[in-house]
Image (tube, rainbow, N blue to C red):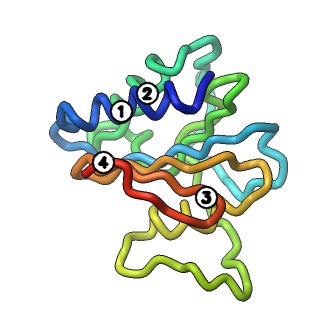
Amino acid sequence: MNQEILLKAIIEIARKGVPTGFTGLGIILINKDIGTLPISPLLSEDGFNTEYLDAQAVVNFLFSISSLKDKRHDGFHVVNLDFGLLKISQYFSPLIPKGFNETVFDVGARYRTAQYGSLYENVTSIIIVSQKGEVSVAKNGMVELIIT
């Protein structure tokens, strides 16, 4: 799975307008295994299987569950760029880095979590989509707004 194709698919949906009731979306992109990533499932993972989904199918699935009507809407979702969607609805609790001087203020918890989480070695980037459809990417501790 290619990060640019995944991001392009997300932007395409966001530009058309997010669905009514959209709760926002956080996607952790990793380049290795999950390792020591500080995540914990918010829901039982029984029956979860998205093997062999391409980038567009993963994005469509994640947007479809990002609604208050779906119990899987909360938390971050983990995508391995080689193996696809690994985990959904994960509580993600990165450490606050001591001495980090680039903290973003006046944002929600999802953005701050993405900023700190993007500092982990096995995290390529974290894509955040706001409830309004704004797309941002956190990478190496920096958050960049892609579209509003």
Compared with residue 1, is residue 77 higher up or lower down, i.e. above or below? Answer: below
Q: Secondary structure at mark 3?
A: strand
Question: Which residue has dot 2 on it?
Answer: 59
Dot 4 crowding, Cα within 10 Å, few <14, some 14–19, many 20+: few
- Give whichever of discs 4 and 1 has the lower sequence position: 1
Residue in the foreground of this view, choosing between 68 and 35: 35
Q: Residue at x 18, y 36 (%)?
A: 17
**Marks 1/3: CA distance?**
19 Å
Dot 2 crowding, Cα within 10 Å, few <14, some 14–19, many 20+: some
In-image side of 45 versus 61 (left or right) = right
Of badges 2 and 3, nearer the viewer stands: 2
Q: Residue at x 49, y 62 (%)?
A: 143
**Marks 4/1: CA distance?**
17 Å
Q: Residue furthest bottom?
A: 99
Question: Which residue has dot 1 on it?
Answer: 63
Question: Which residue has dot 3 on it?
Answer: 92
- Give whichever of discs 2 and 4 has the lower sequence position: 2
**Marks 2/3: CA distance?**
20 Å
Residue in the foreground of this view, choosing between 100 and 64: 100
In-image side of 129 versus 84 (left or right) = left
Compared with residue 102, is residue 64 higher up or lower down, i.e. above or below? Answer: above
**Marks 2/1: CA distance?**
6 Å
Mark on residue 147?
Answer: 4
- Give whichever of discs 1 and 3 has the lower sequence position: 1
In-image side of 59 versus 32 (left or right) = left
Q: Amino acid at mark 2?
A: Val
Q: Amino acid at mark 3?
A: Phe
